[in-house]
Amino acid sequence: MKALLLLLAQLCSASLVPEREKDPEYWRRQAQETLRNALRLQRLNQNVAKNLILFLGDGEMGAPTLGWGSGAGGDRDAMNWVIMGGGRKYMFPKNASDVEYPREEKHRGTRLDRRNLVQAWQEAKPPGKVAKYVWNRRELLALNLSRVDFLLGLFEPGDMVYELDRNNETDPSLSEMVAVAIRMLQKNPRGFFLLVEGGE
């Protein structure tokens, strides 16, 4: 019975296919026509994307790496407009107490060269430009972004915590960080590229 039904289905489907579609040349002509139409449309659209946001599921990238991804063009100053995430302990001298967890040894600074990279980041900005460092949600959301040229937000000593474990008082959500980053970056008339990484 199954064999009979299968044979019947094949006969029906074969008879429903127009004769021209059995010819491989028909499909080559169809493909060529589709390609020509697509190329014609491509020539009409001369627009260039101005802003680009790339969301990366879980790339295991820290704040120093992400900093090079946020900005615009190849201009080094533009590429440092906004950096936000975790990794605070990697920016401070070895054994420096953490601002949020001052009594916890595992959150202390780790830099063997004893440099304060947050301070170095602020000092490296051009004269007349305002570079702000924030470490908690309240400071981030209170910023007057029209008066800030560069922003560094380091909200955890190590990795950012998962959304379900996030402290709503001290840690901004990913959507809050993205909203602030977009507001900062859209001040650049040349447009921007923003790389957003979220964990699992």
Image (cartoon, helix red, strand yellow):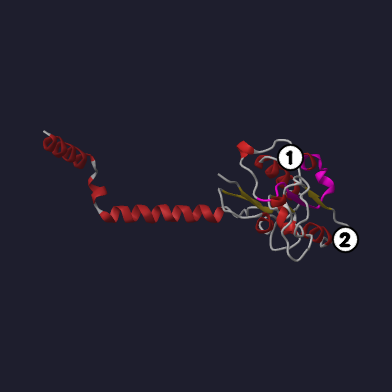
Residue furthest bottom in the image: 113
Horizontal side of 74 relative to 55 (left or right) equals: right
Vertical comparison of 70 with 15: above or below: below
| The N terminus: image quadrant | top left
Label 2 environment density (alpha carbons within 10 Å; few <14, some 14–19, many ≥20): few
Q: Position of residue 59 (x, y in %)?
A: 57, 53
Vertical comparison of 128 with 169: above or below: below
Separation (CA) of disc 2 from disc 1: 31 Å
> Is 113 in the magenta?
no
Residue range highlighted in magenta: 140-158
**Residue labelled with disc 1:** 170
Q: Residue at x 63, y 38 (%)?
A: 165
Vertical comparison of 153 with 13: above or below: below
Looking at marks 2 and 1 on the same chain, the residue that comes earlier in the sequence is marked by: 2
Q: Residue at x 61, y 41 (%)?
A: 162
Helix, strand or loop at label 2? It is loop
Q: Position of residue 105 (x, y in %)?
A: 72, 51
Asked if residue 65 shows in the view, the reply is yes
Mark 2 vs mark 1, foreground winner is: 1
Question: What amino acid does circle 1 point to?
Answer: Thr
Horizontal side of 162 relative to 120 (left or right) equals: left
Q: Position of residue 13 (x, y in %)?
A: 21, 40
